[in-house]
Image: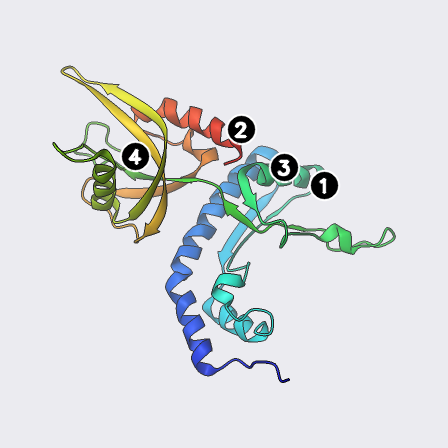
């Protein structure tokens, strides 16, 4: 029985899928690069980090070349975004590997230790390939000069209107401030700020991205995605600092 063959229509459809999503992978690559640069500065002397999203041309070629294995490459290929670190010593590489194991979700089935390809009397390529997902990220907005805490990074959210359910209010505020649609998951913490006339209480939730692209309202002038390792080091509004430090520790301990 002859094997199935790819068609021009299938190929155009697959390339179209990736073309729409590539900006997200480029953003993901930049997030990985920033994260791994911080890791290299902390754990190595001269290590470097690089990251990139696969080009559309490269994706189109691989979709055809790997058709026999992947009929749905947009969901099956594991290298649509890639990053690497280069170190001078094995001890430095081991420290970075331990960081990755502790701070990412790893797809062990598709990851590979290239050391295992070599026989005891051979010398060659010794990289370790991890297929990963970032376990957690926060979206922050920078406050404009007209705000009291100008230039600080703020957490999207806002006030609950009279008669409005809390979850509906949070989804509405995030949509208005960022353009994103979320699925709320669980409460992860709280914060407060004291003003001369009242006290503001904040309830902070984890959420999953459902749809949308970041489109800021005039409440913020810029946005920033940060991972758990960087959250507590970011120039946050003061009321969120204690939460950021405590929550980053909780994530690392729980392996979330």
Crowd class of label 2 (few under 14; some 14 to 19; many from 20; radius 10 Å): few
* Residue tagged 1: 90
Which of discs 1 and 3 lies nearer the camera? The answer is 3
Task: Report the Cα–Cα distance between label 1 and label 3.
Answer: 12 Å
The circle drawn on residue 253 is 2
Precedes in sequence: disc 3 or disc 2: 3
Which of discs 1 and 2 lies nearer the camera? The answer is 2
Task: Report the Cα–Cα distance between label 3 and label 2.
Answer: 14 Å
Q: Are marks 3 and 2 in contact (CB under 8 Å)?
A: no
Residue 115 in the image: above or below residue 191:
below
**Residue most toward the bottom?**
2
Look at 53% across and 34% down and name the residue there: 255
- Element carrying mark 1: helix
Look at 49% across and 72% down and name the residue there: 60
Quarter of the image for residue 138 reads: top left
Precedes in sequence: disc 1 or disc 3: 1
Look at 43% across and 80% down and name the residue there: 9
Precedes in sequence: disc 4 or disc 1: 1
Residue 216 in the image: above or below residue 198:
below
Precedes in sequence: disc 3 or disc 4: 3
Which of discs 4 and 2 lies nearer the camera? The answer is 2
- Locate residue 130, reporting x and y percent: 61, 49
The circle drawn on residue 98 is 3
**Residue most toward the top?**
196
- Image coloring type: rainbow
Res 238 seen here: no
The circle drawn on residue 155 is 4
Task: Report the Cα–Cα distance between label 4 and label 2.
Answer: 23 Å
The one nearer the camera, 92 or 239, is: 239
Look at 48% across and 27% down and name the residue there: 250
Quarter of the image for residue 82 reads: bottom right
């Amino acid at each position: 029985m002859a094997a199935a063959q790819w068609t021009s229509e299938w190929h155009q459809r697959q390339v179209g899928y990736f073309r729409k999503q590539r900006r997200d992978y480029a953003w993901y690559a930049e997030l990985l690069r920033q994260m791994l640069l911080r890791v290299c500065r902390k754990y190595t002397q001269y290590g470097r980090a690089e990251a990139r999203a696969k080009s559309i041309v490269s994706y189109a070629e691989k979709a055809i070349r790997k058709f026999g294995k992947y009929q749905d490459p947009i969901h099956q290929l594991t290298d649509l975004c890639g990053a690497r670190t280069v170190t001078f010593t094995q001890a430095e590489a081991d420290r970075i590997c331990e960081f990755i194991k502790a701070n990412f979700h790893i797809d062990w089935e598709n990851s590979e230790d290239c050391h295992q390809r070599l026989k005891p009397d051979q010398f060659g390529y010794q990289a370790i390939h991890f297929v990963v997902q970032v376990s957690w990220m926060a979206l922050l907005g920078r406050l404009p000069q007209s705000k009291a805490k100008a230039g600080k990074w703020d957490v999207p959210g806002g006030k609950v209107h009279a008669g409005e359910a809390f979850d509906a209010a949070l989804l509405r505020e995030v949509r208005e401030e960022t353009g994103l649609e979320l699925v709320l998951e669980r409460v992860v913490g709280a914060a407060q700020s004291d003003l001369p006339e009242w006290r503001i209480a904040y309830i902070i939730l984890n959420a999953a991205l459902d749809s949308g692209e970041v489109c800021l309202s005039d409440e913020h002038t810029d946005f920033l995605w940060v991972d758990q390792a960087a959250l507590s080091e970011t120039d946050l509004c003061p009321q969120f600092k204690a939460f950021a430090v405590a929550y980053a520790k909780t994530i690392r301990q729980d392996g979330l």
